[in-house]
Image (tube, rainbow, N blue to C red):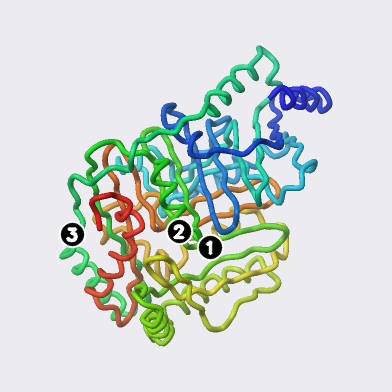
Amino acid sequence: MKIILDKIKHFVQTNSIKSRTLSSLIFDFDTIDFSSILNNIQKIEEPFFYTTHVKKNISFLGFNSVFQVKAYGDSRIENTEKKISELEENFCSNWSEYNVDAVPLFLGGMKFSIDNSNELWSDFSDSDWFIPKFLFLELDGRSFVVYNFFGNPFVNDKITSDFDTLKILLTKNNSDRTIGKIKISSNGKEKKSWIDNVNKALREIDSGSVQKIVLSRQVNLELESKTNITKILEKLGENYPRCYVFAFRKNKSIFFGASPEKLAKISNGIIEADALAGSISRGKTEEEDTALAETLLASKKDLAEQKIVVSFIKNSFTHFCDNVIYEKHPIIRKLPNIQHLWTPIKGEVSSEQSIFSILKELHPTPAICGVPWTKARDSIIEMEPHDRGLFSGMIGWFNFNNEGEFAVAIRSALLKEKTIYAFAGCGIVNGSVPEIEYAESELKLRPIISLFENIK
């Protein structure tokens, strides 16, 4: 720790750091015990953001906040971008000294739509990002700690307090608290309302006013006791190693999940996105699994739904890409409990587009909203008896180097006290059958509901 402090002092003296300067310093670190740190963080009411993607060999955990960006209303994207750009001219880092592909700086998310009045989601802003004081990062077998601060942290000995907090977080804590059991579940109680809404959506599609509407369900799970988010995230990481496992805490709320869908990854002038639509269950045998996949690949309804999503992303890419690359026919993306039609899409960013100008083009996609998206969004807000909040919004990170990675916030839930609010959605298109769509939503709820011991 003394070596890190000496390096920080040298950096501050060498760069003549001023009070308004935002500095971000990265250092090599010992192996990081994320579970232990998360257990310690749960005792302290500070914001944190955690994500891991097991197959990509990346995990990071940002804790405490040195700067927050909150924006509301129709101009949330523009206002977020404005607040962030004001910081950039006074930014200083040592990132170039380390051979790291990209360092996360801003962590957080954005809701599906503007939502100023809903009590359930009141802990989160419409656009909600923060710079953590400390970021623990594991990337391709290497471990780092990042320290973010304004001005000179040695003035008034602020750095001592910061690193005392760091030492507390690094104290070994192997909490044995379990995930817990469900006392009451609303699962299935809203089925009639769901079927009525699907039929209503089908009538709108028949009228020609909309091609696709993505409807969602909210299932409430009352727990016997408070749960351990660390255990939940460990289990999600084990069960879904090819997904973005995440948790974002603000105040008394933790939004968490395991998303299979990449909204956008931007790095070295390349942007990548997933077109993911159409679903079917996994088979009990290899033969049955293959047969189900072939059924999905031959489904006119699901192929039409996938084509809508691919066309949207491709057309969005053309606004900022010279060259868009994707395969004409989708492939199968297999997850432990479900398989999807999947088309990876890649493009070369043609000009100096900001992160948020790109995100504005891409979100919401037809995979989580519909087509045309304005009409579909308005229908969703009218029909759904719940507010989505961060569900089907975006969750991720970005920095000043036009680098970032964002997942579509699906297969997710909100934890408040002893209640889990789990969400799942299905795309309604011409040919959709309400009962079949309901069964699909049950599959999509499984990543959350199956975590709990009394759910089989």
Question: Which residue type does callout 1 highlight?
Answer: Leu
The residue sitting at the right extreme is 14
Count residues near mark 2 (Cα–Cα under 10 Å), then give few for <14, some for 14-19, many for 20+.
many
- What secondary structure is found at the residue carrying circle 3? loop
- What secondary structure is found at the residue carrying circle 1? helix
Q: Which residue is mark 2?
A: 240
Say above or below: 13 vs 318. above
Count residues near mark 3 (Cα–Cα under 10 Å), then give few for <14, some for 14-19, many for 20+.
few
Q: Quadrant of the C terminus?
A: bottom left
- What secondary structure is found at the residue carrying circle 2? loop
Which residue occupies 43% across, 68% down? 367
Which residue occupies 41% across, 72% down? 339
Between 187 and 305, the one nearer to me in the picture: 187
Question: Which residue type does callout 2 highlight?
Answer: Tyr
First in sequence: mark 3 or mark 2? 3
Across and down, in percent, residue 356 comes to 59, 53
Q: Comparing marks 3 and 1, which lies closer to the viewer? A: 3
Q: Which residue is mark 1?
A: 362
Which residue occupies 57% across, 44% down? 60
Which quarter of the picture shows residue 230? Answer: top left
Distance between the alpha carbons at the discs numbered 1 and 2: 25 Å
Q: Quadrant of the N terminus?
A: top right
Count residues near mark 1 (Cα–Cα under 10 Å), then give few for <14, some for 14-19, many for 20+.
some
Distance between the alpha carbons at the discs numbered 3 and 2: 28 Å
Across and down, in percent, residue 441 comes to 30, 65
Q: Which residue is mark 3?
A: 190
Say above or below: 354 vs 19. below
Between 423 and 113, the one nearer to me in the picture: 423
Question: Which residue type does callout 3 highlight?
Answer: Glu
First in sequence: mark 3 or mark 1? 3
